[in-house]
Image: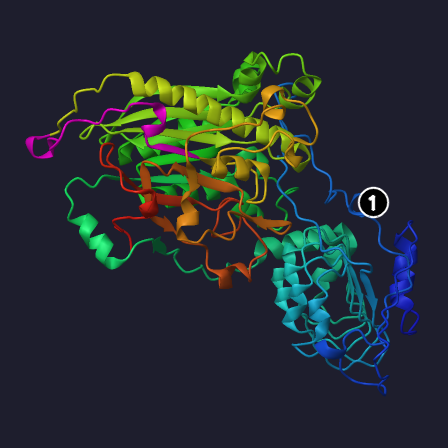
Amino acid sequence: MIRSSRLPHHRARASAMASRTVTKSAIPITNPNHVKPNNGTDVPDAASKDGGTSTASSTPAPTTASESSPVSANSAPNHPSATVAPISEAPRPTAEPPENTWNSLDMGGVNLKTIPHNSGLFTFTFLINLYLNHNSLTAVPPEISKLRHLELLDLSGNALTTVPPEMGMLTQLKELYLFDNQIVILPPELGSLHQLQTLGIEGNPLDASLKGMVQKDGTPALISYLRDTCPMPPPPPQRVWKNVISPAEREALANDPHTETFSVLCYNILCEKYATEKLYGYTPSWALSWDYRKELILTEVMAYDADFLCLQEVDIAQYEDYFVKHLQGQDYEGIYYPKSRYKTMSDIERRQVDGCATFYKASKYQLVERQLIEFSTVAMQRPDFKKTDDMFNRVLGKDHIAVTCLFENKITGTRVIVANAHIHWDPNFRDVKLVQAALLVEEIETIAAYFSKLPPRPPISLDDQLSPSRPPPTYSDGTKIPTIICGDFNSIPSSGVWEFLSTGSVPPDHPDFMSHLYGKYTTEGPKHRLSLKSAYAAAGDISLTNYTPRFQGVIDYIWYSAGNLSVNAVLGEVDKGYLEKVVGFPNVHFPSDHVCLVSEFRVKPVRDALPSSSTSSSNGTHS
């Protein structure tokens, strides 16, 4: 870029005019109560940030992501379905920037010498374009990282000797101008700026090799180099178990010989073929590789030693060649089903199809039966769905599944139903998510009713000391059987899926049906009688189960039947201080974009079930 002009707004306007085709004037920032100061040296603080001296840039607005980036931030490749060949990416949830009437701020050429750490500038989290060029800044505060939606940042023509590593948190940046400063070193943390298309570094005493890299191979080459050579950050503190009951209750339950507990782990491990640089360009390539991630996944899963492991996005090759091989030695046996598209593929291709894997402690539980739930197949079999266009056009094109397993405790004879599900991802198909969740629970209720009619099996006594002290329980109907439904539901707590699972019903005109027609679901409303609760709700909920630059929220759950199970403890959150310093997952410490969930439950005896008020009672074996 030409750097011949020193006019305050030259850089902002010239670069904007050169790279933008969509013209849109920004709205000036005015404050009628503001007293215009003398030529100041500081950015106004929070109380006066909207002053008249700072106006939104009059330059054209930036192009949309699809116009300015090969990888559109708002577009996503088609998700694998039964009718298309496998692809290398699977879209992930995204969150849009905060809405505001203006999103550009031009503070170039106003003789700024410093920006306070508590500047009101850093409260403008909606900003997309920020011009601080041709001032007298010697440093940029690390609080710049709060402006997560910035796509253009111009710091040209200042007196900067470095930029803060925290600038690497601005993963939406597409243009970063650092022309004509005194910058000697670029922090390797800038390697997470995977969407950066233009990095202006001329006019700085940088290492010649870095300049040469940009000149020869372009900005992406330098960003990749910084990303892959960035030192490994300090690991986070260990996640802490959160007990739900008081010490007195814990002691009483621990002394009860009839107390029966089991634990469940739920984890979307991020399938190898979906872990691409296109989707996770902020992750070092070596940390994104399956060879690196698989060891972290296995180590974490085995460390919690749960009775049931429910994993999503496990492909056939990973299941057969890695997980079965290593988990067998830890007393686990597994059940696995891939998504139905594998039926139409060659042997080589089908090994890359992902699905759901459930492992269980073979010394403790007997597998009675297992059942695959293919949502599209179940929908096709419903008489009230068969003639609806919506079912054909929306539901049948998705090959998401759930795996339901029926278990019996070998000692006590207690029965447990464990369902492992992966629901459709696309927010534009909220209706499909709700239909899939309703079909899932409906199938589980049918399975539970069948399971309740089976006669009790004689318990298998492993030795004389483990003989049961009372006869195995009997179940009058399926709702009396302890039930776990867990998985990646791709649905936040305000969704129709969450409402349906947690309350037992949604109205037939629920907004998430999006006015589409799905038989009885949209004439009567789906209902269930399982009395489901989220395990993490008993411990005050969790702030996120999926963490990427574009989305941070809860979409994974462990649901339990509150009528016959109580929560003992849940595995706590990832340290918030750590999260504030990392761009997103996966990274060197977390091998998936999802967070592993673990919960421990206590079985309420069938004949003397505890009242519903003690749903969250536990024996608190974790600390």
- 19 with respect to 229 (left or right): right
| Residue 368 place in picture, x, y as percent | 30, 20
Query: Measured from the top left, where is residue 35 in percent x and y?
Result: 85, 84
Does residue 473 show up magenta in the picture? yes
Determine whether the residue tagged by mark 1 lies in a helix, strand or loop.
Answer: helix
Residue lying at the far bottom in this picture: please name it.
38
The image quadrant where one finds the C terminus is: bottom left
Q: Nearer the viewer, residue 187 or 146?
A: 146
Give x and y (percent) for residue 364: 23, 32
Residue located 91% across and 55% down the image: 24
**Residue corresponding to mark 1:** 67
Q: Amino acid at mark 1?
A: Glu
- Relative placement, left or right, of 116 versus 368 is right
Q: Which residues are magenta?
A: 463-485
Q: Is residue 540 left or right of residue 140?
A: left
> Where residue 102 sits: x, y (%)?
82, 60
